Image (cartoon, helix red, strand yellow):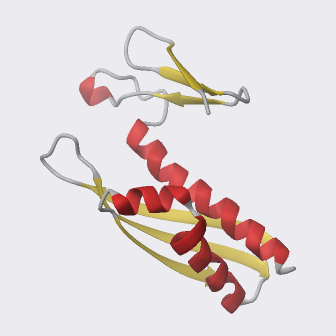
Amino acid sequence: MRIELKRIDDAFNMEAVSEDGNKALMDAGPNIGGKGNGVRPMQMLIMGLGGCSAIDVVMILKKQKQEIKDFKITIDAEREQGKEPALWTKAHLVFLITGAVELDKAQRAVDLSMEKYCSVSETLKRAGTAITYEVKVNQ
């Protein structure tokens, strides 16, 4: 895999482009001279956790012939305080699924993603992040 990153302003705003041509904007916060015109890199890592797991879960549920009407994940995460680098210490994901989806199948899909398939989850765990999650269907 190859990613190209280029600076697009006079501060910290960066554009990352994947080998497929997809783009993501990153920036620093105003507290360190950024303009807030993009996602902060550490936020992107947590977004990647959600995206990785979402792809797994949707794929598994589709194979189980579950009909997903809506799918969302909320993630609350915390970083180390007073350290450089400040790693993620914990992340809690809430999977919110609506449709003709059985709770036990949704729970199994999330378990498989978080414990077996999601590479981002495993990467964060190996770095010491405590990851917890819950599944809510049609709530």
Image quarter hosting the C terminus = bottom right
Q: Is residue 55 left or right of residue 86?
A: right
Q: Give percent across and percent down for residue 58.
A: 74, 67
Q: Residue at x 47, y 36 (%)?
A: 39
Q: Residue at x 68, y 75 (%)?
A: 97
Q: Give percent across and percent down for residue 127.
A: 32, 56
Q: Residue at x 60, y 63 (%)?
A: 53
| Most foreground residue, 86 or 68 | 86
Q: Residue at x 77, y 75 (%)?
A: 61
Q: Is residue 57 left or right of residue 87?
A: right
State whether residue 10 is above or below residue 21.
Answer: above
- The mark tally for this picture is 0
Q: Give percent across and percent down for residue 51.
A: 60, 55
Res. 34 visible in picture:
yes
| Most foreground residue, 81 or 115 | 115
Give the farthest residue toward the left. 82
State whether residue 10 is above or below residue 43.
Answer: above
Image quarter hosting the N terminus = top right
Q: Give percent across and percent down for residue 89.
A: 28, 60
Res. 137 visible in picture:
no
State whether residue 66 is above or below residue 34.
Answer: below
Q: Is residue 69 left or right of residue 93?
A: right
| Most foreground residue, 4 or 34 | 4
